Every structure is written in structure tokens, then in C-alpha cells.
């Protein structure tokens, strides 16, 4: 005798037990490999970011080594001392400008503000508020 199989409407057997087990095994494999594959892709992205950061750090190290070589040159050190610290050589005369001359704008500073350092702090603050409220001359009709 033949074993009985469930038949569909077209005379074909419906899903067999082997096909169901195979589908179940494939589903379990798919689920079990999904997490490790996702972790692998995340690690690949992190690795690319870290390699880029390492390359940027290598470039920064190269820049700093170049700057260090500059600082070993006595003429560069003297130039930096002049520019940054205002040092002068023994036979030179140094000077510091404390207050520059008044510019063409007269008694007021830029855009109608009082010169820096003149008046009390609240007067300077209020004059800046008033100046901010005015329409610039370029925009007047």
C-alpha cells in the first residue's frame, strides 16, 4: 500500500514534512547568522573610521614635527620672540602704542559708538544698544 499524503486541490501533495523541516532549519540559520553579520558590518564601519582618524593623527604629527624643526632654528626663535613677546635686540629701541590717534570719524568710534575705554561701562553699554537700534546709512532711502 501507498502511504497517504495530503493532497491539495490540484492533485499535488501539500507541504511535506521534509520541506517544513528544511524551511524551519533555514529560518533558524538565517536568524542565527543575522546578528554576527550585523556585528561584522558595524566593526567594518568602525575600522574605516579609526583608519581615517589614524591618518589625520599621522598628518598632525608630521605638522608638529615640521614646527619642531622650525623651533630648532635660532632665527625663527628670535622672530617669534619679536612678534609674540615684543622683544627687541640690545641695540634697537622698542616701543608700545598705548592709544592710537583718533581716526577720521572724530570723537566717536566705529558706527557712532564712543571710543573704547571712555565713559563708564553702563554708558558704553547703552550707547551700543542705541547704535544697534539705528538704521545703517547704506540702507537709508
Image (cartoon, rainbow, N blue to C red):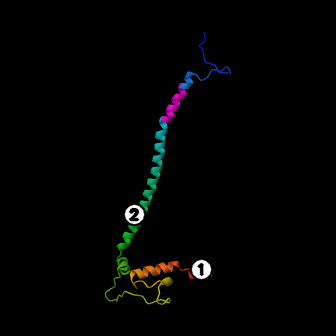
Residue at 57% from the left image edge and 25% from the top image edge: 19
Q: Residue furthest right?
A: 10
Residue 83 among those drawn in magenta: no
Residue at 40% from the left image edge and 63% from the top image edge: 61
Residue 23 among those drawn in magenta: yes
Residue at 52% from the left image edge and 28% from the top image edge: 24
Q: Between 40 and 16, which is closer to the camera in this rendering? A: 16
Q: Between 9 and 58, which is closer to the camera in this rendering? A: 9
Judge the density around disc 2: few (<14), some (14-19), many (≥20) Cα neighbours within 10 Å: few
Q: Residue furthest left?
A: 90
| Residue 61: image tag | 2
Cβ–Cβ below 8 Å for labels 1 and 2?
no
Q: Between 47 and 9, which is closer to the camera in this rendering? A: 9
Q: Residue 25: x percent and y percent?
A: 51, 29
Left or right: residue 129 versus residue 75 is right
Image quadrant in which you'd find residue 125: bottom left
* Dominant secondary-structure state across the stretch colored magenta: helix
Judge the density around disc 1: few (<14), some (14-19), many (≥20) Cα neighbours within 10 Å: few
**SS at mark 2 in the image:** helix
The N terminus lies in quadrant: top right
**SS at mark 1 in the image:** helix
Q: Nearer the viewer, mark 1 or mark 2?
A: 1
Image quadrant in which you'd find residue 74: bottom left
Q: Residue 42: x percent and y percent?
A: 47, 47
> In the picture shown, does residue 118 fall above or below 66?
below
Q: Which residues are magenta?
A: 21-31
Q: Residue 116: x percent and y percent?
A: 42, 83
Q: Between marks 1 and 2, how big is the CA–CA gap?
A: 50 Å
The C terminus lies in quadrant: bottom right
**Residue corresponding to mark 1:** 139
Q: Residue 131: x percent and y percent?
A: 50, 80
Amino acid at each position: 500500500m501507498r502511504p497517504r499524503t495530503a493532497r491539495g486541490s490540484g492533485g499535488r501533495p501539500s507541504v511535506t514534512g521534509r520541506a517544513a523541516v528544511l524551511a524551519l532549519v533555514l529560518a533558524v540559520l538565517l536568524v542565527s547568522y543575522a546578528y554576527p553579520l550585523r556585528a561584522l558590518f558595524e566593526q567594518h564601519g568602525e575600522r574605516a573610521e579609526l583608519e581615517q582618524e589614524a591618518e589625520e593623527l599621522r598628518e598632525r604629527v608630521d605638522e608638529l614635527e615640521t614646527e619642531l624643526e622650525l623651533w630648532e632654528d635660532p632665527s625663527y626663535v628670535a622672530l617669534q620672540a619679536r612678534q609674540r613677546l615684543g622683544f627687541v635686540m640690545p641695540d634697537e629701541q622698542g616701543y608700545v602704542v598705548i592709544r592710537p590717534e583718533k581716526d577720521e570719524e572724530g570723537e566717536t568710534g566705529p558706527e557712532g559708538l564712543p571710543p573704547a575705554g571712555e565713559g563708564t561701562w553702563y554708558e558704553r553699554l547703552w550707547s551700543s544698544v542705541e547704535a544697534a537700534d539705528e538704521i545703517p546709512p547704506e540702507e537709508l532711502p
